[in-house]
Image (cartoon, rainbow, N blue to C red):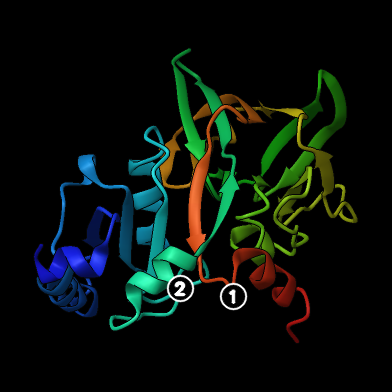
Amino acid sequence: MSQTETETGDLRIAFAASDADGAQESLRRLRHRFGNVPEAEASIVVALGGDGFMLETLHKHMERGIPIYGMHRGTIGFLMNEYTEDDLIAHLQSAKEVIVHPLRMVATDLAGNRHEALAINEVSLLRETRQAAKIRIDIDGITRLPELICDGVLVSTPAGSTAYNLSAHGPVVPIGSDVFPLTPISAFRPRRWRGALLPHASKVRFSILEAKKRPVSAVADYYEVRDVETVDVAEDRSVDIRLLFDADHDLAERILTEQFQP
């Protein structure tokens, strides 16, 4: 048995990294020390970078349901663990698993084309021109907001509630909550509407009013559809996304801590 096999035990680790210099250097060091199996054969993927690269890695392996352990080697690292080499295997073996479910976006554009995508963070609608968007919001087939005049609106997962949703002044939602935030982006009318918390089984439909005059794009994480007419969003509980976090600093704790930041 080689030293690498002795260190990794039963773990079949695939290392992946962003293009950042620090991430690439760490990738070389870790592969040299622990080896590297093809991602298709791995029992765990260690992602090196920031939250953007973590999202890419999660999307890449979503269908396989393989657990992903992120280590911070990028700009923003909310979804990442602290970087370690000497005790990496111990960290992987003791890590806590968090399962999150993505949002499924089904967008129909003005040409009648249908587009589907999954979002781990959020589905956001954004105006494309200088003119404000006009959007009708239906929840479970009932019109709740006949006309929202705004820069945009988004639906967030609990895991993504600390990302764009928080920047748009939406509520932070703890992991495991059976709700998700619906948050306006720079709402002009109704001026005092600050959004809503929806039951996780809710089905949201956004209908773009004056869609040709006031074009709107829809984005599921980083998948964008231009000139949409309707956008349907619902949680997809048939898809499990498995994230691994160090036992002393898991995602639920990070989200709780975020709510008490000055």
SS class, disc 2? loop
SS class, disc 1? loop
Vertical position of residue 205 compared to residue 17: above or below? above
Vertical position of residue 104 compared to residue 258: above or below? above
Residue at image x 73%, y 50%? Answer: 176
Amino acid found under the numbered disc labelled 2: Asn
How far apart marks 2 and 1 lie (CA) works out to 8 Å
- Give left or right: position of 202 versus 22: right
Residue corresponding to mark 1: 249
The image quadrant that residue 41 belongs to is top left
Residue corresponding to mark 2: 81
Amino acid found under the numbered disc labelled 1: His
Disc 2 to disc 1: CB gap under 8 Å: yes
Report the residue that reaches farthest toward the bottom: 262
* Residue 47, percent from left and from top: 32, 62
Mark 2 vs mark 1: which is more N-terminal? Answer: 2
